[in-house]
Image (spheres, helix red, strand yellow):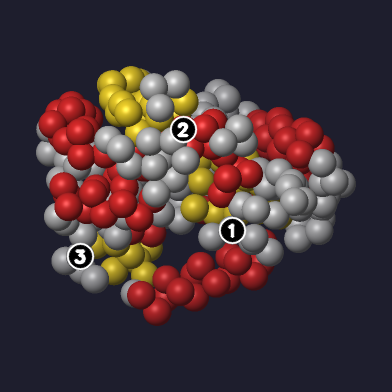
Amino acid sequence: MAKITSIKGRIIYSSRGTKTIEVDVISDNQYLGRTSAPSGASVGKYEAVSFPEGGPEESLRILNENSKKFLEFEPNDLKSIDETLKSIDKTSNCSKIGGALAYAITIASMESASKAVGKQLFELISEQNAYRFPIPLGNILGGGAHAGPGTPDIQEILISALGAKTIRDAIETNFKVHNELRNVIEKNDPSFTNGRGDEGGWAPKCDNEKALELCGKACENLGYTLGKEVSLGVDFASSTQWNEEKHLYVYERAGFENTPEQQIEFVAGIIEKYKLIYA
């Protein structure tokens, strides 16, 4: 296996127009792996911290200061790479170096390794012979941190075309539901101005239950049955509703509060009613 001979980073901009980090890992002076790190609008309390205090610039400074520690590793030696990242960070949630930097270094290293052996990255990760595309999840309705006031508290509702036979069919189905949902929303609210959240889902002014009903109606209009040809998914982003002082999940837009036990019942009820595949 090749050896890492160079590792560099740079600041780039995400689709939201915010700064993030991109990393290049080069092995044997020729095999380039390049990865940019995503960063969500809301982050769960138990997720790795995307960036340290000081933001992406601080992550980049730390990378520049420690880049030599990764040289001469085999790029697929994730154990050594991970141990080195942990030795630099020394926290439980990547708050010193940033989870975005750790992610970018790891994936860029594996991409460099795959090129060194003449394989695609997915082939290096899995040795099985029968590969197939995963079924994509498409964001069709946004709320929470992804959209403005008046939208649902739950962060996003997604669609997945479980009955599709090919990746192309699945993508086309997602587009069809997304487009039909706009028609359904406009009929429900003639004042709807085609507003969207920052990940492309429609952002209507309605409560959680109505949002789910509208999504279900869009699927029904196209002749799909929930749980059969298509399934909905929900990103509740529940940690953004959690109020530490009250020890309650506070749904400010919908005007109710849940105890942890009530929250479980609330989520379970939605999963059962709408046959969610993702929550």
Residue 89 rendering spot, x and y as whole percentages: 17, 49
- The part of the image, by quadrant, that contains residue 61 is top left
Which residue in the protein does label 1 denote?
278
Q: Is residue 57 above or below residue 173?
A: above
Towards the viewer: 105 or 18: 105
Towards the viewer: 250 or 234: 234
Local secondary structure at mark 1: loop
Q: CA distance from mark 3 to mark 2?
A: 43 Å
Residue 121 rendering spot, x and y as whole percentages: 57, 39
- State the residue at coordinates (39%, 49%): 77
- State the residue at coordinates (20%, 33%): 68
Relative placement, left or right, of 149 versus 212 is left
- The part of the image, by quadrant, that contains residue 137 is top right
Mark 2 is surrounded, within 10 Å at the Cα level, by few (under 14), some (14 to 19) or many (20 or more) other residues, namely many
Residue 192 rendering spot, x and y as whole percentages: 57, 28
Q: Are marks 3 and 1 in contact (CB under 8 Å)?
A: no
Amino acid carrying label 2: it is Ser
- State the residue at coordinates (44%, 45%): 76
Res. 15 in view: no
Local secondary structure at mark 3: loop
- The residue mark sitting in front, 3 or 2, is 2
Q: Which mark is residue 112?
A: 2
Q: Earlier in the sequence, mark 2 or mark 1?
A: 2
Mark 3 is surrounded, within 10 Å at the Cα level, by few (under 14), some (14 to 19) or many (20 or more) other residues, namely few
- The residue mark sitting in front, 3 or 1, is 1
Q: Which mark is residue 244?
A: 3
Q: Which mark is residue 69?
A: none
Q: CA distance from mark 3 to mark 1?
A: 26 Å
